[in-house]
Amino acid sequence: MFSWRAIGNHFVEMRSYFVIALILLLAGMFVGASNEQLEAFLNSQLSGLEQFVKTADASSNPQLTMFFIIFFNNVIKCIVVMYLGALFGIIPILFIFVNGMVMGYLFNMIHTSGENLFLIIVKGILPHGIIEIPALIVACAYGLKFGTLGFRGIANLVRQVPGIGLEYEKLAIRSVPITVILIVSLLAAAVIESTLTVWLLGK
């Protein structure tokens, strides 16, 4: 189950779902950057992130607190997105699209404020985002796959096509090492975000 070759082969099988998740993220970024009607909603999403920062700053060890907040928040979301994707893929679709909208909205805000968007992306997003964003895409892709099987399972009640149960079992087994890889990746991203990213933005 934890064979790197098997995981690599399964990633190849999942490539269309990775592409769909990436497209949803990019579409969300475009909508968030270009649709002013969503400003109130997106500001509410950003206020949640600001609350995390305030909670960390109010603690005795802000850096360590920020690390735990980032890590557990991302891990919980990834696990929820992966396995509750079985509810017809609704949760992963909303999750990746809304995250893209927030990113697009934030980038647009930075750009219109006159700040150096490229520099902020390099300092504030890239160091941890190069790990975190692919991890979120992978989690959503698996959620979408579970959602597809959910639809096929409903259709199977009518058509009685064999093999759905085995596909569920195979995906569930494959998702275990993927979850471990995601947790380790998000751990590394949280360490980088709470240390290197903070340091770079403070320079």
Image (cartoon, rainbow, N blue to C red):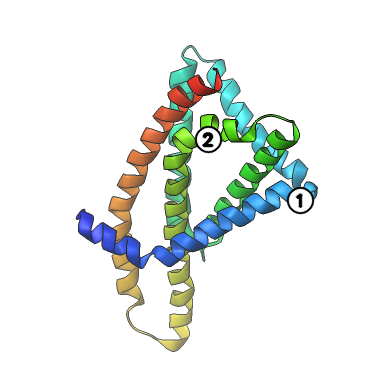
Q: Is residue 133 above or below residue 58?
A: below
Q: Nearer the viewer, residue 167 or 105?
A: 105
Q: Residue 94 appears at what percent x and percent y?
A: 59, 55
Image quadrant where one finds the C terminus: top right
Q: Determine which residue is flagged by label 2.
A: 125
Amino acid type, callout 2: Ile
Say which quarter of the image contains residue 50.
Answer: top right
Q: Nearer the viewer, residue 13 or 89?
A: 13
Q: What residue is rendered at 58% in x and 24% in y?
A: 53
Whether residue 163 can be seen here: yes
Q: Is residue 156 above or below residue 5?
A: below
Circle on res. 35: 1
Q: Between disc 2 and disc 1, whose residue precedes?
A: 1
State the separation of the CA atoms marked 2 and 1.
22 Å
Identity of the residue furthest to the top in this view: 60
- How many numbered marks are there? 2
Q: What residue is rendered at 49% in x and 19% in y?
A: 199
Q: Residue 74 appears at what percent x and percent y?
A: 46, 40
Q: Residue 55 appears at what percent x and percent y?
A: 56, 22
Amino acid type, callout 1: Asn
